[in-house]
Image: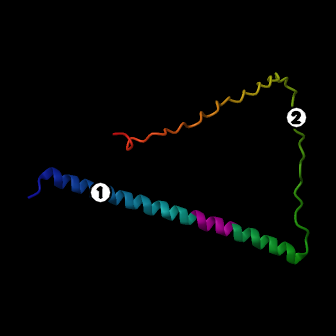
Amino acid sequence: MTTSYILERQEDLKAHKKMMREAEKAAVEKMEEEKELRQAANEARIKAKVDRIVRGNAPPVKASVSVQAPKATEVEVAEEKPKPKAKSKMFSKKKPVIEESSDASEEG
C-alpha cells in the first residue's frame, strides 16, 4: 500500500514530464520553422541569381570601402638585459670501484 505523499509525488512527476514534453515539442517545431524560413530565403536568393544570369545582367557590384587603420603609436619598450647563462654544473668524477679480494666464503 502506497502512502498519500508518494502518490502526490508521482502525480507531480507526471505533470512535470508532460510539461517538459510539450516544451520540447514546441522547441522542435520552432527549430523546424526557422529551418524552413532559412531554406525559403536561400531558394529565393538562388532563384534571383539564376534570373539575373538568364537575363544577362551583370551581378551587382559590391562597393568596397577601404578604411585605413590608424597608425600604431610607437611605444618605448624597456629593453630587458639578457640574463647571463647559467654555469654548467660541475660533476665530480666517479671514484673507482674497489673490489675486495677476500670473500666471506673463504673465511672460517
Instruction: Tell me which label, 2 or 1, sits earlier in the chain.
Output: 1
Name the colouring of the figure. Answer: rainbow
Which residue is pictured at 87% across the width and 32% down the height? 72
Residue 86 is one of the magenta-drawn residues: no
Q: Secondary structure at mark 2?
A: loop
The amino acid type, in three-letter code, at marker 2 is Pro
Query: Image height check: is 91 above or below 65?
Result: above
Which residue is pictured at 49% across the width and 40% down the height? 101
Which image quarter holds the N terminus? bottom left
Which residue is pictured at 22% across the width and 52% down the height? 9
Main SS category, magenta section: helix
Q: List the single residue furthest toward the left.
A: 1
- Which residue is more in the foreground, 43 or 75? 75
Query: Image height check: is 85 above or below 104?
Result: above
The amino acid type, in three-letter code, at marker 1 is Ala
Mark 1 burial class by Cα count in 10 Å: few <14, some 14-19, many 20+: few
* Image label count: 2
Residue at numbered disc 1: 15
Which residue is pictured at 11% across the width and 53% down the height? 3
- Which residue is more in the foreground, 87 or 10? 87
- Which residue is more in the foreground, 90 or 7? 90
Magenta stretch, residue numbers: 34-41
Residue at numbered disc 2: 70
Foreground mark, 2 or 1, reads: 2
107 lies left or right of 2: right
Q: Secondary structure at mark 1?
A: helix
Q: List the single residue furthest toward the bottom.
A: 54
Q: CA distance from mark 2 to mark 1?
A: 61 Å
